[in-house]
Amino acid sequence: SAHWLLWEPQCQTHLRHLQDRARVAATIPPRLDGHWVSSRCEVRPGPEFLTRSYTFYSNPTRLFKALQHYYSDSDCQVPAYSLLIQGKLRFRKASWITRGATEAEHTLLNVALVIHSQQSIHHLAVHLPLYCLGLGPGVHLVSHRLYELFSAKAEKDCLGALHFSMMELELLRMETQIHPHGHPSKELFLGDVHTDWNQRAHYRPTGYQEPLQNTMHYIHPCPVCALVYRSSEQHPPILPPSWSIPMNLDGLWVSQRCEARPAVLFLTRLFIFSEEQRSWEGTYHHYSDPMCRHRTFTLLASGHYAHMEPSGKIKGATELVFKVTHAKVTVFEQTLVRVLNSSEQGSCGLAGGWELGMEQNITWTAGCSVLGILLPHKEYELFKMEKDQKGRPLLFIGERPSDGSSPDRPVKRPTSFQTPMVQCSAVAPVTQRYNPRSERTRGVSSASAQYSVFPVLLMSLLNLWFWYMLV
């Protein structure tokens, strides 16, 4: 499936760089001391638009101070309110669910609210009970005043109405990147936020959000980092307009890093889109480790898509409908080969015909029930395009539902995004089309097959959580 890469040196270089993780070191447990900030206007499910500025203090108490600034627009230019959060953090152990992460426990000490706009005053007056804000009848909320929402000492808790949670602090990973011609940069990955607001407060994360940058060691250039660093609860950062660009999917797009998915899956994605034919092809390389070195299986999926209309929820985003019609799988893990070979005849490619490093077409069996793949399959998607600081096109694709289901109905369309992909070629090559009747074709070498996957990964493969990864 990667024959076209030979003709796309940029894409090849990018994929090689992803594999060459020698310049990336993960510290377990993470050294959190210092100040960490958002590098862009962040989108959370809902959608909610925010920037984060977190400070962690030295031992022994492990106190932290977190500032979250919420906005009423997707460019983070119209501040709504800010939350000032103080608490304590205690590391527990290396995570057995998400390899390379550290589990932690957080204790909130107090949370205070500052409102920045008249619109937010109306919104919060409806959602927050008066007693929460220490107000009596006939007393109105005002902007720029500090209102206490939570205090551990006073046993006061009014956070539920805001769907507020700091469960993101319960899963952490810190990466230091050594750049060939520059200073090292440090990124802090905190736990993912549940896509269903009602689950947020109790959800223990198994994946990550977009990383925060260390203010002393950040990826250059980062104009947003400086603005967020200088902010306070009274003076939220007002970001420059995002570099949104019109939707043109043509070309090749690749992951910018080894991506983590909830439930122990690490992967890199690679997409080819043809706007003229409205066709797409996606290659999902799955790995058992957070550096994406040890392959477990590769999924090659393809189909067609239709543009719908601009999103009413996120400015500059587009609603699409994707159809997945063909799929092939190559397995690099002996345990998974055995599982697929013992599957029921006609339920997942040629039962008994799975071998290490050999590609099987699963289109003719309408997918693979063991892996939770159903063909043909329809998904309601949300896409957005921007340029990064270097002027390269970025593609934001909708976040997968946290419960492992698929956005197969319009009501389940995503309202937030996965880690953006970068364009490595603006020209879509002529891709090989599938023959649904062919049972198996010789595929990639089994160079990575000797690595065994620890049992939790296999459990996750069997549950599959497959649609976390698809488009």
Image: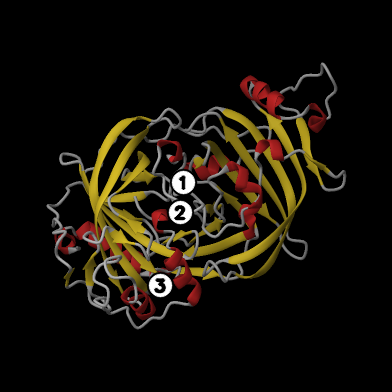
Q: Is residue 377 visible?
A: yes
- Of callouts 2 and 3, the N-terminal one: 3
Determine the CA span between mark 2 and mark 1. Answer: 7 Å
Residue 394, compared with residue 443, is above or below; it is above
Q: Which mark is residue 22?
A: 3
Which of the labelled discs sits on residue 34, or is there none? none
Q: Residues within 10 Å of mark 2 (few under 14, many from 20)?
A: some
Q: Amino acid at mark 2?
A: Ile
Q: Position of residue 125 (x, y in %)?
A: 71, 24
Image spot of residue 188 (x, y percent): 55, 57
In the picture, measured across the screen, residue 440 lies left or right of residue 129, that is left
Say which residue label 2 marks.
Answer: 219
Q: Which residue is drawn at the image coordinates 83% and 25% (left, top)?
A: 135
- Which residue corresponds to mark 1? 222
Q: CA distance from mark 1 to mark 3?
A: 24 Å
Residue 91 to residue 71: above or below: below
